[in-house]
Amino acid sequence: MRSFKLVALTTAIAVGGTVAATASSSAADSSASSRQSVFHARLTGYEEDPLVLSTAGSGMLKAVVNDKAQEISYRLTYAKLGTVTQSHIHFGGRAQSGGVSAFLCAGPGSGAPAGTPVCPATGGTVTGTIKPAAVVGPAGQGIAPGDFAALVAAIRAGKTYANVHTAAHPGGEIRGQLR
C-alpha cells in the first residue's frame, strides 16, 4: 500500500509540473506576442553625421513598438529649425549614416508612402503609425521594403536613428539614436 501511495504522489507531482510548465509556456508565448516596447531619441545637431552641426534646433521622438499589431506608434516633436522637408528613421549606428527605413513626416515630392503625415514647417509635433507597408528599406543594408520584423530588430539592437532634414541641411539638421 505504501509503494502505491508513493507512485501516486510521484505521478501527481510529475503531471502537476507538466501542467504548470505548459501554462507558464503559454503565458510567455502570449506576453511575447503582445509585447510592447518604448524607445526614445533626443535629437540635436551634435549627433549629425558626417558633419556635426551647431544649430538651435532640437527634438524628441517617442516610438512604441507593438509586436502583436505589427505597428510602431510615434510622436515626433521639434523646434527652432529651418524649413523642414522630411523626417525618417534610418538604419545606422551611432556616428554612422544609414539608409531610410521609414518616414516620420514628409513634404511634397519626398517620395514618402501614402498616408505619411506632413511635417510642421519649422517646429511642432507630428504623430503617426508605421505598419509593414510603410517600411521602405534600406534594401542595400538588408531591410527589404515591408520587412517590419527586420526594422524592429534593428531598433531593439540600438542601430536606428531619427533624423529631421531641412532645406538648409538636406542631409539632416538634427538627429538622435533610438534607445
Image: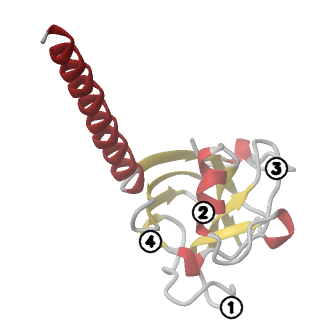
Q: How far is mark 2 from mark 1, CA to CA?
A: 28 Å
Left or right of residue 80: residue 31: left
Q: Which mark is residue 149?
A: 2
Reading the image, the residue beneath label 4 is 129
The residue at the point 54 percent across, 68 percent down is 122
Q: Mark 2, residues whose alpha carbon is within 10 Å: few (<14), some, or many (≥20)?
A: some
Whether the residues at callouts 3 and 2 have beta carbons within 8 Å, the answer is no
Q: Secondary structure at mark 4?
A: strand
N-terminal of the two: label 4 or label 1? 1
Reading the image, the residue beneath label 3 is 49
Q: Amino acid at mark 2?
A: Ala
Question: For residue 111, which quarter of the picture?
Answer: bottom right
Q: Mark 4, residues whose alpha carbon is within 10 Å: few (<14), some, or many (≥20)?
A: some
Q: Amino acid at mark 4?
A: Thr
Whether the residues at callouts 2 and 4 have beta carbons within 8 Å, the answer is no
Q: Position of residue 44 (x, y in %)?
A: 64, 46
Task: Please identify the quadrant where the C terminus is shown.
Answer: top right
Q: Amino acid at mark 1?
A: Gly
Q: How far is mark 4 from mark 1, CA to CA?
A: 21 Å
N-terminal of the two: label 2 or label 1? 1
N-terminal of the two: label 4 or label 3? 3
Task: Please identify the quadrant where the N terminus is shown.
Answer: top left
Q: How far is mark 3 from mark 1, CA to CA?
A: 24 Å
Q: How far is mark 2 from mark 4, CA to CA?
A: 15 Å
Q: How far is mark 4 from mark 3, CA to CA?
A: 26 Å
Q: Position of residue 99 (x, y in %)?
A: 79, 65
N-terminal of the two: label 3 or label 2? 3
